[in-house]
C-alpha cells in the first residue's frame, strides 16, 4: 500500500498541471457568468427596468363619445333602430368610394346580423381616421342624398388603417387562423368573446411582426407562425410571470376584487409541484399556444369583474380592456373616464398605442369570418 504522502504529492502535481487548471477555471468562470446574468434579469424585473412607458392615446375622447352615443341604443324604439341601419348603409356606400376594402368588411359584419351599434362603431372609427386624412369624405356624407353616386379619382384599394396593408399583417392572419380552435376553447372556458382575446394578441404580435427582424426572416414569415416570447414577457400574448402568478391566486380567492366565481377556480391548476417551471413551459410552448390565450382571457374577465364591482362597467370597451391588458394590474384603477393608451408601438415609423391598435383591429372588420364582433363580449358559449 502506497504512503499517504506519495498520494498527496501526486494530487498536488495533477492540480498544478494545465490539464486540470484550464477546465477548472473555465467551469468556475462559466458558473459566475450565468449567476451574474440571472441576477441582472431578476433585478430588471423587480425594478421594472424592462417596462415600456405608457401614454394616453390622442383619440381617447373621441372613442369615449362614440361609446356614450350608443350606450342607450337598446332602449330606443324600432324606428330609431331602423334609422341607424339606414344611416349605416348610407355611410358604408360613401366609404366604398374611397376605401372599398373597409366598406366591404363593414358590410359583411352588417349582413352577418351584428348589433347595429357595433357596425356604427366600425364606421365611426373610419370617420375618426378620415376626418384629418380626407376632408372631402365627411362633407360628402351631408350631400349623399342629393347627388348621384360617382367614384373619385383618388379611390384607393388599400385598407384605411395603414399597418393592415403590411405583408406582415397577411402573415399574421394566416398564423392566427391556425390557432382558431385554441382561441375558441379558451373563450368557452372563460366565456370571453374570441375576438376580444385576439385584439390583445394583435397588440402584442404586431410589434414583433417586423420584416427587418431576423426572426421574421428566418421562421415567422416563411412558416406563417406567431412569435413566442420567452424572456420577460412569455408566450404569444406576452404574459409576464408575476402577472400570471397573481392571476392564478385571484382565481381561488373569493375576497379578491378579481375573483371570477367558483366555476372558474380550477382553470389554471397545475399538474406538478414545480409551478414556476410548469408555468414557464405552458406559456412558452411553440407547438401549443392554448395557455397564452387562456391566461389572456382570464385577465380580461378579471378586469371586467373588478370594474363592474366598482360601478364602472367596461364590458363594451375593447380599447380600455386591451389597454389594461397591456399595462397590468397596478394601473387598473376603476374610474368614470378610463383612458385609452398603453405602450407605444412604432410600426413603419408611425407610433400607435397598444389600446388603439387593439381597437382598430376589433372594429376594422378584418377576419370577422373567423372571429365575429359580438354585442356581448363576456357571454361566449359556442
Image (cartoon, rainbow, N blue to C red):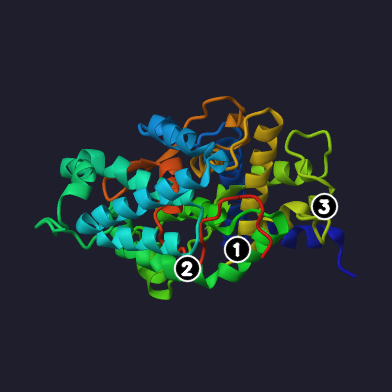
Among the 4 quarters of the image, the one containing residue 135: top left
Q: Residue furthest left?
A: 153
- Expressed as whole percent of the image width and height from the top left, the position of residue 211 reads 32, 61
Q: Is residue 53 in sight in this rendering?
A: no
Q: Residue furthest top?
A: 336
Which of the labelled discs sits on residue 183, or is there none?
A: 1
Above/below status of 271 relative to 318: below
- Expressed as whole percent of the image width and height from the top left, the position of residue 62 reads 38, 33
In the rendered structure, the answer to whether residue 245 lies left or right of residue 362 reads: right
- Expressed as whole percent of the image width and height from the top left, the position of residue 341 reads 45, 35
In the rendered structure, the answer to whether residue 236 lies left or right of residue 207 reads: right
Which of the labelled discs sits on residue 369, or is there none?
A: 2
**Between marks 1 and 3, how big is the CA–CA gap?**
19 Å
Q: Tag 1's secondary structure?
A: helix
Among the 4 quarters of the image, the one containing residue 335: top right
Which of the labelled discs sits on residue 263, or is there none?
A: 3
Most foreground residue, 95 or 23? 95
Q: Tag 2's secondary structure?
A: loop
Amino acid at each position: 500500500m502506497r504512503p499517504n504522502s506519495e498520494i498527496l504529492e501526486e494530487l498536488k502535481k495533477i492540480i498544478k498541471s494545465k490539464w486540470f487548471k484550464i477546465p477548472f477555471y473555465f467551469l468556475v468562470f462559466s458558473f459566475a457568468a450565468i449567476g451574474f446574468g440571472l441576477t441582472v434579469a431578476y433585478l430588471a424585473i423587480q425594478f421594472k427596468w424592462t417596462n415600456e412607458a405608457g401614454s394616453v392615446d390622442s383619440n381617447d375622447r373621441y372613442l369615449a363619445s362614440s361609446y356614450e352615443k350608443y350606450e342607450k341604443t337598446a332602449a330606443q324604439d324600432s324606428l330609431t333602430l331602423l334609422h341607424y341601419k339606414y344611416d349605416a348603409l348610407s355611410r358604408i356606400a360613401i366609404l366604398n368610394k374611397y376605401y372599398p376594402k373597409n366598406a366591404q368588411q363593414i358590410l359583411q359584419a352588417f349582413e352577418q346580423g351584428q348589433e347595429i351599434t357595433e357596425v356604427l362603431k366600425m364606421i365611426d372609427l373610419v370617420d375618426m381616421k378620415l376626418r384629418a386624412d380626407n376632408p372631402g369624405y365627411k362633407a360628402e356624407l351631408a350631400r349623399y342624398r342629393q347627388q348621384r353616386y360617382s367614384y373619385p379619382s383618388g379611390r384607393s384599394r388599400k385598407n384605411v388603417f395603414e399597418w393592415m396593408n403590411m405583408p406582415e399583417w397577411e402573415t399574421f392572419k394566416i398564423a392566427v387562423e391556425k390557432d382558431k380552435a385554441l382561441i375558441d376553447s379558451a373563450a368557452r372556458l372563460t366565456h370571453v368573446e374570441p375576438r376580444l382575446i385576439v385584439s390583445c394578441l394583435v397588440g402584442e404580435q404586431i410589434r414583433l411582426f417586423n420584416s427587418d427582424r431576423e426572426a421574421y426572416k428566418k421562421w415567422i414569415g416563411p412558416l406563417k407562425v406567431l412569435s413566442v416570447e420567452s424572456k420577460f414577457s412569455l408566450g404569444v400574448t406576452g404574459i409576464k410571470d408575476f402577472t400570471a402568478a397573481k392571476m392564478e391566486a385571484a382565481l381561488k380567492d373569493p375576497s379578491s376584487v378579481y375573483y371570477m366565481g367558483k366555476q372558474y377556480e380550477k382553470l389554471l391548476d397545475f399538474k406538478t409541484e414545480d409551478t414556476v417551471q410548469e408555468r414557464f413551459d405552458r406559456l412558452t410552448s411553440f407547438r401549443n399556444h392554448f395557455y397564452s390565450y387562456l391566461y389572456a382571457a382570464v385577465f380580461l374577465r378579471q378586469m371586467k369583474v373588478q370594474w363592474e364591482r366598482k360601478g364602472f362597467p367596461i364590458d363594451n370597451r375593447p380599447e380600455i380592456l386591451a389597454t389594461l391588458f397591456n399595462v397590468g394590474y397596478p394601473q387598473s384603477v376603476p374610474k368614470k373616464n378610463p383612458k385609452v393608451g398603453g405602450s407605444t408601438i412604432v410600426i413603419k415609423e408611425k407610433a400607435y398605442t397598444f389600446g388603439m391598435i387593439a381597437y382598430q383591429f376589433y372594429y376594422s372588420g378584418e377576419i370577422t369570418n373567423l372571429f365575429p364582433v359580438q354585442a356581448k363580449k363576456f357571454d361566449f358559449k359556442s
